[in-house]
Amino acid sequence: MFPLLRRLRPWVAAFVLSSLVLPAARAADRTPVSGQRTLILGDSITQDGRYVSFLEYYLHRLSSGPSSDLISIGLGSETVSGLSEPGHPFPRPCVFTRLADALGKVKPKVVLACYGMNDGIYLPPSAERLAAFDRGLTELADKVRAAGATLILITPPVFDPVPIASKLATPTVAPTGYQTPYAQYDDVLAAFARTGLQRREQGLTVIDLHGAMTEELAARRTGQPAFTFSPDGIHPNDLGHLLIARTVARGLGLNPPASPLEAELARIQADPLFARVAERRALRSEAWLSFVGYTRGGVFKSGSVKAAEAVAVRLQTEIEALARHR
């Protein structure tokens, strides 16, 4: 087909090619977050922010629809279950201590939430802890719905025991929490993921990150037994964050490249658009996290996000100009 296009007049060829490309672009325009103010909640993996920056980059590069307004306020150690292990330096914060303020101040139309890593408090499987996580998801869904927003759940990333074998609990050393995790803690996260996925039957959108990471990690380990996305067993590296972003982007209806993660990471990090997206994301995340307020061994709150938003407007102008050059 394409050799034939080269023999057509340029404007005819352009029209025919656009007819092939536009259906995909229109599909991307229908992502749930396109043109919507979107609040992103989660624990330290979300607070790190790299996967959010990669996701926002994909939204700019792969969607021709209106820009998405992502406000990410992940908080380290946070849970949706309200659980905390005795040896933790402070009681783990629970999202419900700040959710009402977050919904009231951000006023999102969509909420993306990724919890689970901390909710099993790094101990063996427990019916009580699973029930607490399940109740937390139900409460989160109810409160987001009551605020007039749409909730999209993301199942938790994997826990990887391989790189931290010396830190794990053993038959003679009992698991105590994050300092000495249960060796098969990923089984707990897999159960949490199944609990989240059951909410698809209730009409909720659930993106199965745990399943995608488990599959990719197993494929990598076939040839590289020591390969990991999480050098400390919990927090993803750049490749892990990119895999999270790819998985979430696909769950939102985008079609990110299927190229190897390493090549895709190098390409994105070399794109000037990504640098601006990451700068703007970090600026807004820090400002909105404090503006909403949170508790983590103390209460933290500040008064305004105006200065950060003024800079964010300038950065958004640069982002949109760069995004036009696809």
Image (tube, grey):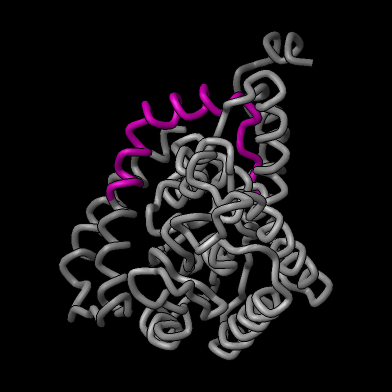
The quarter of the rendered structure image containing the N terminus is: top right
SS assignment for the magenta stretch, majority: helix
Residue 269 highlighted magenta (yes or no): yes
Task: Identify the residue shown where x is 26% and y is 73%.
Answer: 290
Left-right relation of 284 to 255 = left
Task: Identify the residue shown where x is 63% and y is 55%.
Answer: 185
Residue 195, image x, y percentages: 75, 69
Is residue 188 in view from this perspective? yes
Residue 303, image x, y percentages: 18, 81
Left-right relation of 124 to 306 = right
Taking depth in this image into account, of 5 and 8 the one nearest to the observer is 5
Q: Outermost residue toward the right?
A: 201
Q: Outermost residue toward the front?
A: 172
Where 129 sits versus 319, above or below? below
Taking depth in this image into account, of 84 and 67 the one nearest to the observer is 84
The image quarter containing residue 142 is bottom right
Taking depth in this image into account, of 257 and 94 the one nearest to the observer is 94
Residue interval drawn in magenta: 254-279
Residue 193, image x, y percentages: 71, 61
Total number of numbered discs in the rendering: 0
Where 210 sits versus 225, above or below? below
Residue 255 highlighted magenta (yes or no): yes
Where 265 sits versus 74, above or below? above
Q: Outermost residue toward the bottom?
A: 146
Residue 309, image x, y percentages: 24, 65
